[in-house]
Amino acid sequence: MTTEIWQLSESELLAESAAVSHQIQLLEARRIALVGEIDTRVSREKLGFPGPAGWLTSTTLLTPSKATKIVALARGLKNFPDIADAINTGSITVDHAALILTFAETPPKDLPQAGQDMARKAMITAATGPDARTDRIRAAITNLNDRFGGKTPPPENTDRNELFASKTLNGRLVLKGDFDAITGEKLLTALSPLTEPRPAADGTETLKIADDRSPARRRADAFGHILDQYLASSSRPTEGGERPHLNLHISLRDLTDLRDSADRADADDITDDENTRTADESDAGPTADRGAYRDMFGDGTTVGWLPWMGPLSRNTSRQLACDCVLTAIVMDEHGNPLNLARTARTVTAKQRKALIARDHTCAFPGCGKPASWTEAHHIWHWADGGPTDMNNLVLLCGFHHRLIHHSDWEVFIGTDNHPWFVPPATVDPYRKPRPSHARAGPHIA
């Protein structure tokens, strides 16, 4: 019988924590080996995705970046058994294995094979045990790249350029970049005139009076200004048949509410709270639960919604709605655009906007590729007489568009006027329909 944690002595707490940590490392190594086998043996049709990363993300709590990292490790470790042995025995961590594997797969081009083997062995030794330090391994990699990386100095090597963009759990975007000297110079030159401290209203130049923004805040504001100028330019490239632009999805009711004064909104909120409280006190069981659910999730809708970043607050929605071009798309009570019939094969710009408002992303369960990367798929094929109507269209990314055409996966529009997907019997013997990606999760009955 497992001893309760509060009953453990200090020595037992330390010992068990260390033992559990070691077991986690071994389990992570086991997962990597299993994913490697899945990658080799399981078909794309059965996965429902181009590879194991998408399947992992859709069936576990792993983030896409973590799932991708696991698959990359599973594939790469097959070619480097020494790194695989170190991680399988729990001698090194997954993160250190990934760092060493990246070096092993892309070594400096002038480093001979004997030097690569020696360097890899030394890095595994440096990563082994509690004394392992990531900085020492990175320093060794940097030193080798600088000495054997060829004629291009590191500051001028564009092959090293990277830009990471990660959406956080609280709905913000974190950027991390690594650029060559020329690209860096372009960026800093573009930011420079926009990052100067703003003068005070009376024209004085005292910085404490004029602008209390930090340098990082000034750079962020400048970057936003550059994006505004780019999106306003007529020479930018197209995507999905249109030039990139900001889309805000908002219901007519919420847009109208946003135009009311703050005082009136506050008064309405107070009245609504009193009515809700009275109703909740009189109701019992499921009715009260539905009321609480509706208060929190709004029946699956939000005041504002952005295709890339998701929910948006009332105040920011108000700001965007004051300066934009409105495209009216009439929605039913299920958040589904009313049918926009069309007799031509291609989808109109307004139909595409309506599809994005309904499906949000690639609709295939667990995918969620951005809407700008999707295509409008005819459920009943156009060549077979299928119309280009909203109740015959669904947004799918390139891979899932091909999967629907060339496999036993099926898609139909349900009674809620949203797409539903039926897996083949090889995936689910009962062929239970699955809701579209944006519709997954709990809903009020």
Image (tube, grey):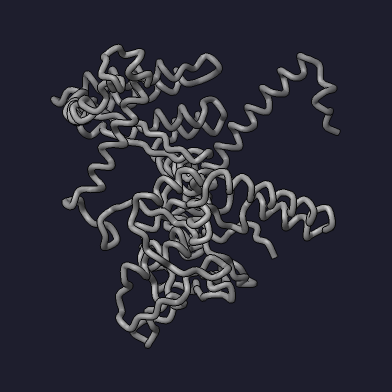
Q: Position of residue 268 (x, y in %)?
A: 63, 50
Seen as rendered, the residue at the extreme left is 151
Taking the spot 18% from the left edge, 52% from the top edge, the residue there is: 234
Would you say residue 208 is visible in this rendering?
yes
Is 323 placed left or right of 315 in the picture? left
Q: Please tell me whether residue 114 is drawn above or below residue 63 in the rendered image.
A: above
Taking the spot 31% from the left edge, 52% from the top edge, the residue there is: 245
Observer-nearest of 114 and 281? 281
Observer-nearest of 195 and 173? 195
Q: Position of residue 347 (x, y in %)?
A: 33, 73
Taking the spot 35% from the left edge, 82% from the top edge, the residue there is: 382
Seen as rendered, the residue at the extreme bottom is 385
Q: Please tell me whether residue 415 is drawn above or below residue 371 in the rendered image.
A: below
Q: Position of residue 344 (x, y in %)?
A: 30, 81
Q: Position of residue 206 (x, y in %)?
A: 30, 12
Observer-nearest of 38 and 411? 411
Would you say residue 197 is visible in this rendering?
no
Is 260 placed left or right of 246 in the picture? right
Observer-nearest of 417 and 54? 417
Q: Please tell me whether residue 363 is drawn above or below residue 124 in the rendered image.
A: below
Q: Quadrant of residue 89?
A: top right
**Total numbered badges shown on the rendered structure:** 0
Q: Which quadrant: the N terminus?
A: top right
Q: Quadrant of residue 429?
A: bottom right
Taking the spot 57% from the left edge, 28% from the top edge, the residue there is: 90
Q: Which quadrant: the C terminus?
A: bottom right
Q: Quadrant of residue 139?
A: top left
